[in-house]
Image (cartoon, rainbow, N blue to C red):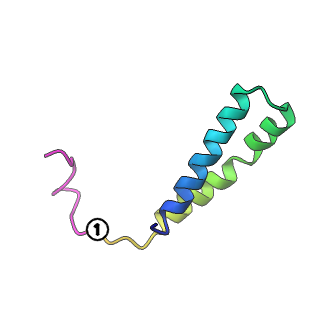
């Protein structure tokens, strides 16, 4: 697994657990706690993805739309 994909999977799992907790009507404190700490994993994910060492060989003008 690529290093920058791990945070994406973790934050997606966090979101699924959060939505499931709301739908299952779990403890309100747990839901509010998850809501209050949710910016931390999102900022971590954005930082990891933006600082990933990925080399792009094409320019925006060449592949601005991938379906071409």
Check residue 66 for magenta coloring.
yes
- At horizontal 78% and vertical 36% (from top left) the residue drawn is 31
Question: Relative to 14, is 56 on the left or the right?
Answer: left
Question: Residue 32 lies in what quarter of the image?
Answer: top right
Q: Position of residue 33 (x, y in %)?
A: 81, 42
x then y, percent, for residue 26? 80, 31
Residue at figure coordinates x 65%, y 54% from the top left: 41
Residue 63 in the magenta stretch? The answer is yes
Q: Is residue 3 above or below residue 25?
A: below
What number of labels is visible?
Answer: 1
Query: Compared to 57, does 8 lie above or below?
Result: above
Crowdedness near tag 1: few (<14), some (14–19) or many (≥20) residues, C-alpha within 10 Å: few
Camera-nearest residue between 55 and 19? 19
What residue is drawn where x is 48% and y is 61%? Answer: 5
> Considering depth in this image, is 61 or 56 the residue closer to the camera?
56
Question: Is disc 1 placed on a helix, strand or loop?
Answer: loop
Side (left or right) of 16 relative to 32 = left
Is 19 left or right of 8, judged from the image as shown?
Answer: right
In the drawing, does residue 4 fall left or right of residue 57? right
Which secondary structure is most common in the magenta stretch?
loop
Q: Residue furthest left?
A: 68
The segment highlighted magenta reads 57-68
**Residue with the mark numbered 1:** 56
- Residue at horizontal 85%, vertical 32%? 27
Image spot of residue 58 (x, y percent): 21, 64
């Amino acid at each position: 697994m690529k290093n920058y994909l791990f945070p994406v999977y973790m934050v997606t799992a966090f979101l699924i657990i959060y939505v499931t907790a709301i739908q299952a009507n779990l403890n309100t404190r747990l839901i509010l706690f998850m809501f209050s700490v949710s910016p931390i994993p999102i900022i971590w994910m954005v930082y990891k993805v933006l600082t990933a060492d990925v080399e792009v060989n094409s320019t925006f003008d060449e592949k601005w739309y991938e379906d071409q």
